[in-house]
Image (tube, grey):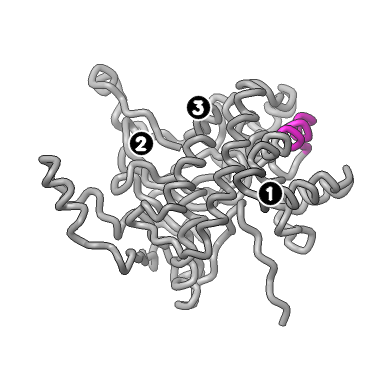
């Protein structure tokens, strides 16, 4: 999600002491931007995120899924998924609970979203033949099986998750929850007791992003894996245990990249790249030596087009290196589910 840059006339009117605590999603553009970023990553066109050849095909497949999500959002409209009733929303607000809990009752429209998503993906089979078998298996899931899979995904019950079907069910849930979240008032939503869970739906963040533009300039936000909202958490604070004494950043760069290429290109355009547009700072792992976990952090100051879900999925090489150093991933990527190896 890219935040709109304010015009000069709007900047003067800002209260510069107010940090936007919650950035609600913009489903009308969110999934199109994700699809474009996934294709950019699959093409190896992001200097700060080197992508292994074995992953490029999967990124392309997920780009088709994001295209389908965008088409479903466009067809349903901004209020295509209904909010819970006012009594439920007020109860959650009064008790500092997520107003749209991912582990609560699902909106009835989510099944329509799922069916429409599969219909949209039918059109991509010609360019992504592997989708054909996947769609056949997805349509073979009975009602109880589909609801059970959704329960397992949203509740984090790994034993009940089919990793081949899960990304497509997640895609339908993301559309449903983002459409609901976008209808809320960000000033109304209450912060939770813990800053490590989404204040809108209570889900885990997939990663964090340093944003630019307006009052969000330079601030770090955690990006929800379900409803796509983002909430503020100060930098150099672990997004898992909230300790701040032993946080560090680990990064990587493409071994084939020319470290001077960005500056040469900028010089040719009459610009200067000093601290900005540093590919080594686009994607980093934020590690914590208190809880020995990590999450990735993506910096819009160094790549305007960062997209936390797509960039996290593409930067698996960083996961491997940080895991080898002894850190455990705090939470997974909603578009990739791996079976745990049996002992």
| Rendered location of residue 127, percent (x, y) | 60, 45
Height in image: 277 above or below 230? below
The residue where tag 1 is placed is 131
Q: Does the magenta segment cover residue 289?
A: no
Query: In the drawing, does residue 288 fall left or right of residue 125?
Result: left
Secondary structure beneath label 3: loop
Nearer the observer, 73 or 9: 73
Q: Which mark is residue 216?
A: 2
Q: Does the magenta segment cover residue 112?
A: yes
Secondary structure beneath label 1: helix
Height in image: 174 above or below 259? above
**Which span is picked out in magenta?**
105-116
The residue where tag 3 is placed is 187
Secondary structure beneath label 2: helix
Disc 2 vs disc 3: which is toward the camera? 2
- Mark 2 vs mark 1: which is more N-terminal? 1
Nearer the observer, 332 or 126: 126
């Amino acid at each position: 999600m890219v935040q709109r840059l304010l015009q000069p006339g709007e900047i003067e009117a800002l209260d510069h002491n107010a940090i936007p605590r919650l950035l609600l999603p913009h489903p009308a553009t969110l999934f199109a931007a994700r699809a474009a970023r996934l294709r950019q990553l699959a093409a190896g066109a992001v200097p700060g995120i080197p992508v292994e050849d074995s992953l490029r095909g999967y990124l392309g497949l997920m780009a088709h899924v994001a295209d389908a999500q965008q088409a479903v959002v466009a067809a349903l409209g901004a209020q295509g998924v209904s909010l819970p009733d006012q009594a439920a929303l007020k109860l959650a607000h009064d008790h500092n609970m997520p107003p749209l809990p991912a582990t609560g009752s699902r909106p009835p429209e989510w099944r329509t979203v799922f069916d429409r998503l599969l219909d949209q993906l039918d059109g991509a089979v010609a360019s992504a033949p592997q989708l054909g078998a996947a769609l056949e298996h997805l349509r073979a899931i009975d009602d109880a099986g589909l609801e059970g899979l959704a329960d397992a995904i949203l509740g984090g019950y790994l034993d009940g998750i089919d990793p081949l079907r899960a990304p497509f069910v997640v895609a339908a849930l993301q559309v449903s929850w983002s459409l609901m979240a976008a209808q809320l008032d960000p000033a109304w939503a209450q912060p939770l007791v813990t800053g490590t869970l989404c204040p809108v739906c209570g889900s885990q963040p997939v990663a964090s992003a340093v944003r630019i533009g307006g009052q969000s300039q330079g601030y770090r936000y955690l990006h929800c894996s379900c409803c796509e909202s983002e909430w503020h958490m100060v930098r150099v604070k672990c997004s898992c245990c909230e300790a701040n004494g032993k946080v560090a950043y680990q990064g990587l760069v493409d071994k084939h990249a020319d470290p001077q290429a960005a500056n040469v290109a900028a010089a040719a355009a009459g610009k200067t790249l000093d601290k900005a547009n540093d590919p080594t700072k686009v994607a980093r792992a934020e590690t914590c030596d208190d809880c020995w976990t990590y999450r990735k952090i993506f910096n819009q100051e160094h790549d305007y087009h960062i997209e936390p879900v797509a960039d996290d999925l593409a930067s698996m090489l960083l996961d491997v290196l940080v895991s080898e150093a002894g850190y455990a991933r705090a939470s997974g990527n909603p578009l990739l589910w791996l079976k745990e190896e049996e002992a």
